[in-house]
Structures are given as C-alpha cells and as structure tokens.
Image (cartoon, rainbow, N blue to C red):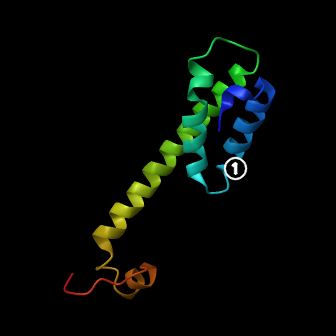
Amino acid sequence: MNLERLPNEEKLCLCRKYYLAGFALLPFLWLVNVVWFFREAFVKPAYTEQSQIKTYVKRSGMGLLFWVAVLTTWITIFQHFRAEWGAMGDYLSFTIPLGIP
C-alpha cells in the first residue's frame, strides 16, 4: 500500500484500525502498523494528525514487544518441560516427537 496517496485523515484512521485490531490477539497487525507508519510518525515533517499516529505507532511497538516476550517465554518453558509434563505436555503438542526425551 502506498501511504503517499492517502490524505492524512485516512492515514490516521488506518493506523488506528490496525492498532485496535492488534488487541484481537493479532500482534502481527501491530508489526505491520509499526513498519508502515514509522516513517509517517517520526520522519515526515509535522502535520496535525502526526502526534496521534506517533502515539499509535509507539503503543503498537510496545504491544508487539510484549507479545514477543510472552511467546518467547512460553515457547522456552514448553520446550524445556514438555517431557516432564507427561500426558499434559503431549495433549498440548500438535506433533508428538518420537524417541527418548
């Protein structure tokens, strides 16, 4: 998408939509929001909607970092303790690795 063609009001509306959609357990949308609107928020010359876009980009970045930390922690714990959890660890797995843990 080319943000250059959109008026500033529509940029703000789109940025807000991606920010709010990220709360529906879709942190990938926060990544898209940060990547797409970083230049609009921090590099372009100042305009009226820029302060709100900057706020949404910062919050999207913080939400994304939070999700990355939570998922990394869960993956590390799961990989480390799955075998010790026995049947519960197997029920949580999509695939059950063969062999001795």
Toward the viewer: 72 or 8? 8
Q: Position of residue 44 (x, y in %)?
A: 61, 16
Q: Quadrant of the N terminus?
A: top right
Label 1 Cα neighbours within 10 Å, binned few <14 / some 14-19 / many ≥20 = some
Q: Which picture quadrant has residue 57?
A: top right
Measuring 43% from the left and 80% from the top, which residue is drawn there? 94
Residue sitting farthest toward the left:
100
- Residue at 67% x, 30% y is 3
Image quarter for residue 36?
A: top right
Q: Quadrant of the C terminus?
A: bottom left
User: Where's residue 61, x and y in %?
Assistant: 54, 37
Report which residue position mark 1 lands on. Answer: 21
Query: Relative to 74, is 101 above or below?
Result: below
Q: Position of residue 65 (x, y in %)?
A: 48, 43
**Which residue is located at x 76 percent, y 24 percent?**
8
Left/right placement of residue 71 relative to residue 36 reads left
**Residue at horizontal 62%, vertical 23%?**
41
**Which amino acid type corresponds to the residue marked 1 in the rendered image?**
Ala
